[in-house]
Amino acid sequence: MQATDQVMRSTRNRVRLVGTAAVSAALVLCTAPSASAVPDFGSTGSIGSGNGHMELTYVNSLTVPTGTPFDGFPIGGLSGIDYDAQRDEYVAISDNRGEQGPVRYYSLRLPLDQAGRLTTADFTAQAALLDTNQAPFAPKTADTESIRFLPGSNTLLYTSEGSARIGLPGFVRETARDGGFVRDYALPEAYAPKAAPPSGFRDNLGFEAMTVDRAGTTVTAASENALAQDGPAISDRVGSSSRVLRLDRATGADLGEFVYEVDPVRLAPGEAFNPVSSVNGIGEILAISDSDYLTVERNVSAAGGFSVKLYRTSIHGAENVAGKAVLSGTERKMRKELVFDFAAAGVNPECVEGITWGPTRPDGTRTLVLVADDNFGIAGKTTFHLLTVGR
């Protein structure tokens, strides 16, 4: 399906959705924030210690009805989100591969009421993302997953997982607000998918996650699971050694690569592992400081549905594996600490794939906003979750 000129540029049509806000429930755990548009709480050098302690509390959720139209196409596939405090504006990217309208991102607002709760999702514009030839992506040539504002600029950064099955590499790409191509970042050869011997991103397990630090100088992207040459596929018995890649925003230079161990797949009681329908991986990563991050591990199984955990992790003490074509399995990995579990809060997360620092509530507390992908009605619902961040 080819996009027309009418949908290749931002529109001024608006869709304002008033969703059903879930009853608030609270889960208090320790973590820390910081990134674009939020205070820098600093790096402690030790996960969960010092002034890095924060508390995450679930506030409420907002669901957008499946199939809600906007500018001629259904709102869906929201796989990444970011917030610009100066504009009080969010961007959210769809992982539609050009088969349900153009490859695109949305601009929207998620205002808070006087009690500091999500009440509406106000979609204000969409823009078709363009390939390197400044034309719309051909169907199935991009699998867009994460999106971020670039501090101090009027451009955005986004990722694609590519398609390992056909040898299509993923990318980290800068785009103009109207969707026009600006530049690609050069990626290490180890990430390029190859069939023989198997190497690079596994299919649909590439750059699902990406973040930019507060200063806007470092871009960090994480593979959802291990590269094919780095370890076995994930299962309910073994986790997966993802690579976390840090790039210099200005030059594109490789600033380091680190290993993050994803938890094994969680199954429902009595459920047998099925590699087709069961997976756990890094759904998104969010910068806390120049060295610390929050990761979203999104787990799914046929019987258990979706479960989502947030971890705080750090490159402090982890081995820099930049330049390694293949991991040995003996590398010092990034430490991580569980800081929030939707199941422990009694909340159905749906298919959470995006997280951003949100606005300040009326009482002065900071927020995190997460978005869940509805997979265009196949599984899950488009849902926004609000968490507060406190000491």
Image (cartoon, rainbow, N blue to C red):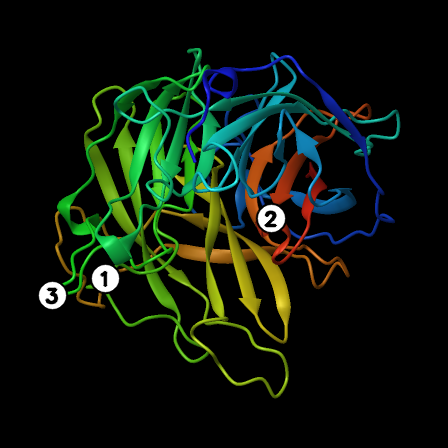
**Which residue position holds label 3?**
197
Q: Is residue 356 above or below residue 58?
A: above
Say which element carries label 3.
Answer: loop
User: For the residue carrying disc 1, how many other residues have a C-alpha within 10 Å: few (<14), some (14-19), or many (20+)?
Assistant: few
Q: Nearer the viewer, mark 3 or mark 2?
A: 2
Q: Is residue 230 above or below residue 287?
A: below
Q: Nearer the viewer, residue 252 or 218?
A: 252
Q: Residue at x 28, y 72 (%)?
A: 232
**Which residue position holds label 1?**
331
Q: Mark 3 to mark 2: distance in Å?
A: 35 Å
Lower sequence index among marks 3 and 2: 3
The amino acid beneath tag 3 is: Pro
- Taking the image as shown, residue 140 lies to the left or right of residue 308, namely left
The amino acid beneath tag 1 is: Glu
Say which element carries label 1.
Answer: loop
**Which residue position holds label 2?**
376
